[in-house]
Image (cartoon, rainbow, N blue to C red):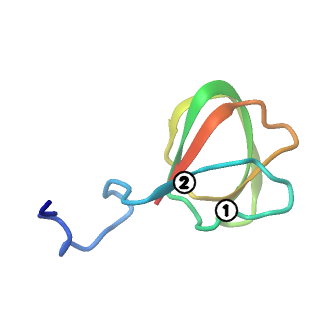
Amino acid sequence: MADEFELYRSSLESPGWNGEEITPSDSVNLTTTCRAFWVGGAGDVVVEMASGKELTFENAMGWMPIRVKKIKATGTTATGIVGVW
């Protein structure tokens, strides 16, 4: 199948081109700092931002267009989390 966009340079406004299911962890960083993540089952999400700052998003659901390097297990109650980059 042809990819008519493969020669275009990707930016933060571009759609994600790769992703992975995320298992929250207090000690393990994501394999790639994501540019956004999807929350399929509403709940709180505790993240470590790309900058290193820790934040809690209460009652998160849907797309979170933020760059994070870790989604922490402690305090995270949301489910179905998928990171894209």
Q: Are marks 2 and 1 in contact (CB under 8 Å)?
A: yes
* Outermost residue, front side: 1
Mark 1 = which residue?
30
Helix or strand or loop: what does disc 1 sit on? loop
Left or right: residue 5 compared with residue 35: left
In the image, residue 14 above or below residue 45: below
State how far apart marks 2 and 1 are (Cα): 9 Å
Q: Position of residue 79 (x, y in %)?
A: 67, 32
Q: Position of residue 58 (x, y in %)?
A: 72, 29
Left or right: residue 82 compared with residue 13: right
Q: Position of residue 27 (x, y in %)?
A: 86, 61
Residue in the picture at 50% in, 57% down: 35
- Amino acid found under the numbered disc labelled 1: Leu
Residue in the picture at 58% in, 34% down: 39
Left or right: residue 78 compared with residue 81: right
Q: Position of residue 83 (x, y in %)?
A: 55, 51
Mark 2 = which residue?
20
Q: Quadrant of the N terminus?
A: bottom left
Sequence order check, earlier mark of 2 and 1 = 2
In the image, residue 70 above or below residue 6: above
